[in-house]
Image: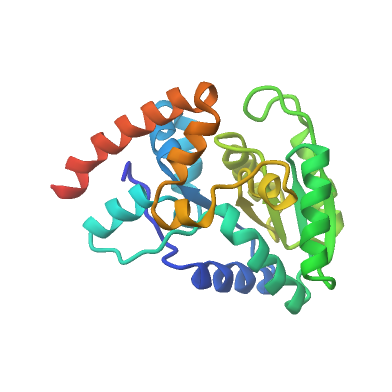
Amino acid sequence: MRGVRITIATLEEAITHALGRAAEGRGFTFFTLNLDHLAKLDDNSAFRDAYLRADFVSADGWPIVWLARKQGAPLERVCGADLVAPLCSAAAASGVPVAFVGPRPDAQAGGVAALKARSPSLTVALAETPEFAGETAGADVEAIAVRLNASGARIAFLCLGAPKQELLADRLARLCPTIGFIGVGAALDFISGQTPRAPEWAQRANLEWAWRLAREPRRLTMRYALSALAFARAIPEVLA
C-alpha cells in the first residue's frame, strides 16, 4: 500500500519488538497505518518518506487489516490507543523508562496519572507538551532531543496526531539513536477520559469510525471522505 510495508502483525508482537529494541538501546520509529494516513501519503512527500523509513508499522483500523489480508497477511488491528497501556505495563515490569510528548497538558497529566495508577513502577522520565505551529514548526526539535537524551527514556510516545507525530519521530530518531518513538495520536486523551472512546460493541463491530463521525461530524466528515477515497484507490492495488 503506497510502498509502505506492514511489519507488525499483533499487539503481542508490537510489545515484544518495542521492548526488545529498548533493552538493546536501539532506537526505532513505530507508526500505526490507518486510512487517514494512507490518504496523507499521497499528498505529503515528507510524511511518505518518514513512513518508508519507519522500523515498525502496524495496521490501525479494519480497512487496513482487510486490505492487508487480501494481500495474504494475517494481521490484527494494532492502534496507538490499544498499545500504550499494555506497553507501559510491560515497560514498568522490565524497568524501561518512557517519555511522553503531547497532547495538551490536562490530557497528558490525566493520562500519565492513569497509567501510573495501573503500573505504579512505571518510570516516566520526561513528559512535556511543546507548542507546534503547523507540522513540526514552532517547536525546538533539537532542544526536545537534548532533553530526551538526558532523561534516560528508552521509549517515547508521541501524542500529536498525523502527520505531526510521524514527522517529529523521523527527525528525533536521528538525534536520539537510543530511543524508540511511537506515534499514538489521541491515546492519552482516551486514557485520561478527556475524550470518550467508542464503546466496546462499536469497536467489535468495526464501527468506531461511525461512532466518532456521529459525535464530531464537522471535524471528521472531510477526513473520512478522503479516507474513503484512499480506500477505494487501494482496493485495485491490493487485488491486482
Q: Is residue 153 above or below residue 187?
A: below
| Left or right of 15 on screen, residue 33 | left
**Name of the residue lying farthest toward the left:** 240
Q: Residue at x 55, y 35 (%)?
A: 163
Residue 58 seen from this side: no
Residue nearer the viewer, 76 or 196: 196
Q: Where's the N terminus, which quadrant?
A: top left
Residue nearer the viewer, 72 or 201: 201
Label tally: 0
Q: Is residue 173 above or below residue 43?
A: below
Where does residue 239 sit, x and y in percent of width and height?
Answer: 15, 49
| Left or right of 161 on screen, residue 119 | right
| Left or right of 160 on screen, residue 51 | left
Q: Residue at x 77, y 37 (%)?
A: 104
| Left or right of 65 on screen, residue 240 | left
Q: Residue at x 74, y 41 (%)?
A: 102
Where does residue 5 sit, x and y in percent of width and height?
Answer: 37, 54
